[in-house]
Image (cartoon, helix red, strand yellow):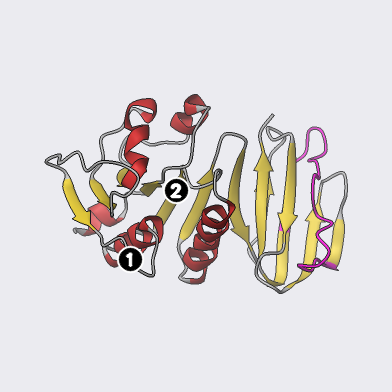
Amino acid sequence: MTGVENLRRCVVIGGADIGRYDHIRACLRADDFYVCCDSGLKHREGLGIVPDLIVGDFDSYENPHLETETIVLPCEKDDTDTVFAVKEALARGFQEFLLVGVIGGRLDHTLGNVSLLLMLHAQGKTAAAVDDYSELEIVSELPVQISGRYAFFSLLNISGTAQGITIRNAKYPLEDAEITCEYQYGISNETLPGRIAEVSVRRGRLLLVKVLP
């Protein structure tokens, strides 16, 4: 892969159901690199995309045997198809990721896929996930801004440590606070009218969920 291709964003498409294709399509870019994971292939028409890479064990979707590069995986393996796809994209040098069709259905797969955001963040990559209702990303020491286009935003501790949390320009501000995995009180906050909310975490990481109207 060339340096120019490395600048493209990698969109990994899983097999979770998508209802609002219009919302997901609005998040896509003309030069995205698309990786379809097994039954993620069912979203090709709804998203209006042509995959650049296909990976999967094809236990939930028949291999279409396209001319597209395809990596066939064994059914018995440590990594899910989605995890393998992300690792493969990392090996190819991608720096920015969008995960689509990875939330919903089986809770175990959803939680596993959300943890991919932590993995990518730990490696210094830019990553987000989108579903029908929300946009997800990891927030840490670098402030993240949240515009008023979102109905709500929530902060969830999914990594075990989150201290020195600051929230400004929101209905429920915080200063040097802590959110633990046992007490998730950072749910359903709102950006103040006409303002841009800002969130940062001095130590640790939080999952930021921006909820659409």
Would you say residue 194 sits in the magenta stretch? yes
Q: Which quadrant would the C terminus be assigned to in this image?
A: top right
Which type of secondary structure does the marked residue at label 1 adopt? loop
Q: Going 59% across and 49% down the picture, which residue do you hit? A: 136
Residue 104 location (% of width, % of height)? 56, 43
Label 2: how many Cα within 10 Å (few below 14, some 14–19, many 20+): many
Q: Main secondary structure of the magenta part?
A: loop
Where residue 205 sits, quadrant-wise, is bottom right
Where residue 84 sits, quadrant-wise, is bottom left
Reading the image, the residue beneath label 2 is 98
Residue 35 location (% of width, % of height)? 31, 47
Per the rendering, the mark at residue 133 is none
Residue 22 location (% of width, % of height)? 48, 25
> In this view of the protein, can residue 197 be seen by the observer?
no
Per the rendering, the mark at residue 76 is 1
Instruction: Specify start and end residues of the magenta stretch as a single range.
Output: 177-199
Amino acid type, callout 1: Glu
Tell me if 3 is positioned left or right of 76 in this view: left
Q: Going 25% across and 60% down the picture, which residue do you hit? A: 73
Where residue 91 sits, quadrant-wise, is bottom left
